[in-house]
Image (cartoon, rainbow, N blue to C red):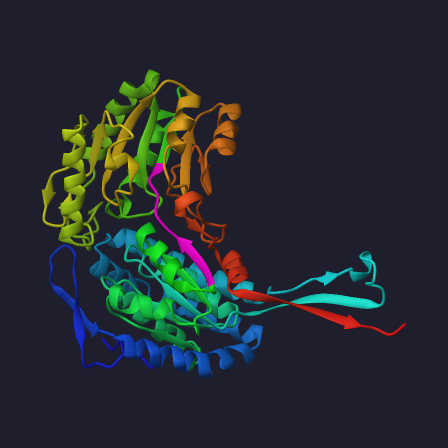
Amino acid sequence: MDFFHSGSWQSKNESFDVTHPATGDVVERVPAADVSDVDAAIEHLDRIGRDVMGRMPAHQRAEILHRASQAIGEQFDSLARTISSECGKTIREARGEVARAAEVMRLSGEEAKRINGEVLPLDAAAGGEHKLGFTLRVPCGVVAAITPFNFPLNLVCHKVGPAIAAGNAVLIKPASDTPLSSLRLVGILIDSGLPASAIACLTGGGGVLGQAICGDDRIRKISFTGSQVVGEAICRSAGLKRVTMELGSNSPLVVLPDADLDAVVAATVASGFANAGQVCISAQRLIVDRSVHDDFLQRLLPAVEAIRLGDPLDENTDMGPLIRRSEADRVKAWLDEATTAGAHVATGGEQDGAFVRPAVITDASSKMKIVRDELFGPAVAVQAVADVDTAIAAANDTSFGLSAAVFTRDLDAAMRFARNVDSGNIHINGGPMWRSDLMPYGGLKNSGIGKEGPRYTIAEMTETKMVVLHLGD
């Protein structure tokens, strides 16, 4: 497979292996960029790419994105296999990601036609007579899209699609574990009519490339999805440029006494163990009213035990491996630490290489890592609470605030939860992992800054100019 389109800037002198998380087999070798490649790519994007994109009319940008969306659909099965092979996601999950990626590019193309300003009544202020004011929204210039491993196509599209729609040139830095989907997307966009001068993809370690990208003044906007630690480091080095940070979480799922427990079980399995728990809005903390705690566990445990681990490309597999063995080791260590501190493993937790069997941890407390921090693995921690007020307090007992869910038939309790829980996304009678690609998506507290979703991303990837016409009497 030829990944080396003209949008891929680094030389082929140095390269590294992309390996299958389940088997360790080499899937592909890709170039390893260095700091000089970063400078060359940004120089080209800033000197040529931003001018090319700035002069491109909105309808042309929209047409490119629509063609790219169609091409993603035409390469549906092949892209799904690439995603599964590089990140270990099951083939069924990978197909879902490809479908969403095509939708994001289509939505971005639609929004390219709706970038507008407003007319201001300047005569509403003294001295504003005989003046006409209006705003223009213009591209930032060069956007850096820094993406994680867990959604190697869709999360790239969430940054690249709106960047192109807004008229920006874009530099992609994908996770070093999963660069293949990004490289394929670059090829799709160029084949769809995007000038090669307007896009670049640099593959390699973030420790080498991140500082060079984020500290460069020619980058005018950084969109990053990843950990809080890396996000804070990016903000420190970014200087005076726009940033969007989609960071970590440990999403709570609250179960009140009147909840439909079967619906809660289904939501827990779907949102707690998808992609081996490697989703930033994965259900991690199950905060359950004591009156239904035991009944809920009796229903939950067999459902979790029924999750089938195995080859991600097998149609019958429900859950694949973690991204690498070291991550499985870390998850296992967190589970062991919790049991040492007094929690109990009700089911699962066994490790085999990069696989960890789905686990349910009971008697968890807020002092444990598995509750306090972001696990990013296939386990849920159950906490028992007395009532809705203690449930809300427990949901807020975290530095994160990306997504939260409550199950209840009580409208008043649901609205108390929605108003009082500090989270950017609130779900009532649904799991915290649900996301529509068109909605405003982003977190509170240490979960980030800014919003994604094509319409909202475009707003953050454009600048506003104020124009004043001084008219005669």
Q: Residue at x 36, y 75 (%)?
A: 200
Q: Is residue 125 visible?
A: yes
Main SS, magenta residues: strand
Q: Quadrant of the N terminus?
A: bottom left
Vertical arrangement, residue 383 with respect to residue 454, above or below: above
Instruction: Look at the image and give the residue range highlighted in magenta.
Output: 242-251
**Is residue 359 found left or right of 272 in the rendered image?**
left
- Classify residue 145 by image quadrant: bottom left
Residue 66 seen in this snapshot: no
Q: Pick whichever, 279 or 225, lies toward us.
A: 225
Q: What residue is shown at x 69% (from left), y 62% (from top)?
A: 118
Asked where in the image residue 207 lies, by quadrant, the reply is bottom left
Q: Which residue is farthest right?
A: 473
Q: Position of residue 349 (x, y in %)?
A: 15, 37
Q: Examine the image and state in which quarter residue 253 appears.
A: top left
399 drawn magenta: no
Instruction: Specify whether 258 is left or right of 458.
Output: left
Q: Is residue 15 left or right of residue 235?
A: left
Is 249 magenta? The answer is yes
Q: Is residue 343 above or below residue 425?
A: above
